[in-house]
Amino acid sequence: MAEAGSFADRVKQQADIVRVVGEYVRLKKSGQNFTGLCPFHAEKSPSFAVHPTKQIYHCFGCGVGGDVFKFVMEMEKCVFPEAIRIVAEKCGIAVPRQKERSPEERKENQQRALLVEMHREAQTFFVKQLEATLEGKAAQAYLEDRGLDKEAMTRFGMGYAPSGGDALLRHLKPKCNEKLVVESGLVSRDQSSGRLFDRFRRRITFPIANESGKIVAFGARALGDDMPKYLNSPETPIYSKSNVLYHMDRAKEGIRRQDFAILVEGYLDAIAVARAGISNVVASCGTSLAEPQIKLLGRFTRRVIVNYDPDAAGQIATERSLSLLLEQDFEVRVLALPAIGSKKADPDLFIREKGAEEYLKLLKEALPYVDYLIARARQMDLTSGEGKRQAVNFLLPYVQKIPNRILRSEWATRIAQQLRLDEPVLRAALSKAAAERRSELKIQPELVARAAKPVERRLIRMLAEAQGFRQELAKQLQNARLYHGLETEKIFEALVIASLSGQPVQATEVGAALEDRDRRLLFEILFEEANEPTWEEAMSCIEALQHRRAERELADVQRSIEANPPGQELRGLLEKKQELMRRLAAAR
Ligand SMILES: [Zn+2]
């Protein structure tokens, strides 16, 4: 968090959360707060509030909340240092240059920068080849034939790698270190002769950018019948294929806005869908999705429509991706495009033949993955017992991955109906599968808001902001152990510690030390409209807590008496009861 005196702390002091949030959310003044529609959940009436003096935000609907950095981290899906930089820039605060930690790290950073620069250079080279050479013109004709016009070529940076064998190498050599050129993966070394040659030859090139838009690799499609049809860059210091999703740099805005992503297989599919005006599309650029790619996607949305090729390989890739996505708690739908004539349609072909509108229509009707899988299972021979067993075995691993019990049960009914299976038998299989899964289940802390009593709410508010007597109040509460056993105990504890430190209480820092549901309650209390606190009021709140505790003790004593203990003990309990009743009567 923002340590005192650090750059982050300085930025936080100077930044105005209302202004920063206001760049993302339309805010209206409402009492002492500003309110607007929550950017983190869908809603029609505003439950998202920003507090200008406490410099915090809180959503009464979905419970998110924090300081200006937390907000930017959530909106931009970035890490803390990045959020500091963004806020600083928005507020016109100069950012100090980052220090590199070790000489090796500096060297690696330099190398990576050079490799990125080399890819930029190669991109310029490929584009020029496509535009200005004879071979390139032929490649253009090929692209146009596939429905890709000049506008598309420019927009997606398509280029051409010539057939010569070392054209790019000769272009790069005068400018770049040879060892680095080899490391870039743009050239390969012939194992027997040791000679260097271009990796991509006689191919159309597609730049692959990382999430921040820097070109880190190329995909290349053969122009003729050369094999393989698609060839990608190898793994390099700046590119790992399981970490990158094609088109992510341009899709992330749309994905966040629409809260779902379309996942396709190849870059030509992604290009076709994006050209149809659907910007939230990414391609996995391999046979199937890898876990780091899912994590990357998960930073922007939890909802995915998988639209892989309808061939056998595509089906396997779809099912593998489904498994991984379900494990990561994604809500998944599947779009299986209908064949066109006798041809199985990938998104590229389908949009070319049927148009963007038809594609969009099918996209809206994409099946929940359950129905997709049931449809797949129904293709098995369900007339025999063996076939039915096969179908259930095909479905069970997916069902097993559904974290929600109710959903799992709904599924069981649906599968039984659709496959005409005996429901009790299926349920037995399912609960066995679920039991096997249970061991990995982590129990989520419940995020339901809790109701604290008004006295507790008031005292919490005072501890957070009554500058004059906060410390004295904290002392009294702590000495009498008045908050022990309360529902709000953890909040009190954190605030008392902060108050006793003598430093101003930072709501976000106290909140950061709490569990999510406690933090949520604390923020709710801080946003309540309230009068200036007074010491008299604080004292009457303390009395109320004392009264409540005496009542609790009295109830305990009464229970012990009713348990009919031996004489000596009973006498002690009766005395205690008298004393508590006297105290309670005096307080009235
Ligand atoms: Zn919300």
Image: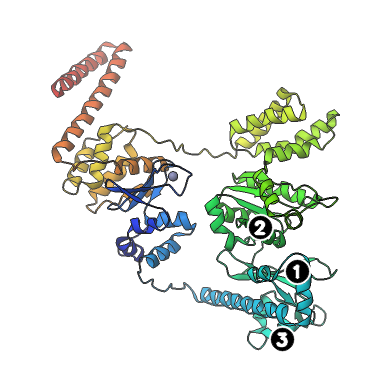
Which mark, by number, is residue 556?
none
Q: Label 2: few (<14), some or many (≥20) within 10 Å?
A: some
Mark sitting earlier along the chain (2/1): 1
Crowdedness of circle 1 by 10 Å Cα count: few (<14), some, many (20+)?
some
Q: CA distance from mark 1 to mark 3?
A: 29 Å
Q: Quadrant of the N terminus?
A: bottom left
Residue shown at the point (69%, 71%) measured from the top left: 150
The residues tagged by marks 2 and 1 sit, at their Cα atoms, a distance apart of: 16 Å
Per the model, the C-alpha gap separating discs 2 and 3 is 38 Å
Answer with left or right where residue 440 lies relative to residue 182: left
* SS under mark 3: helix
Residue type marked 3: Arg
- Which is closer to the viewer, label 1 or label 3? 1
Relative to 452, is 516 on the left or the right? right
Write down the quadrant of residue 496 in the picture: top left
Residue 276's label in the rendered image is 2
Q: Amino acid at mark 1?
A: Glu
- The percent position of residue 523, horizontal first and vertical second, equals 34, 44
Q: Give above or below for 103 relative to 548.
A: below
Could you say which disc has been placed on residue 170 in the image?
3
The crowding category of the residue bearing disc 3, from other C-alpha atoms within 10 Å (few below 14, some 14 to 19, many at least 20), is few
* 2 or 3: mark nearer the eye: 2
Whether residue 513 is visible, yes or no, is no
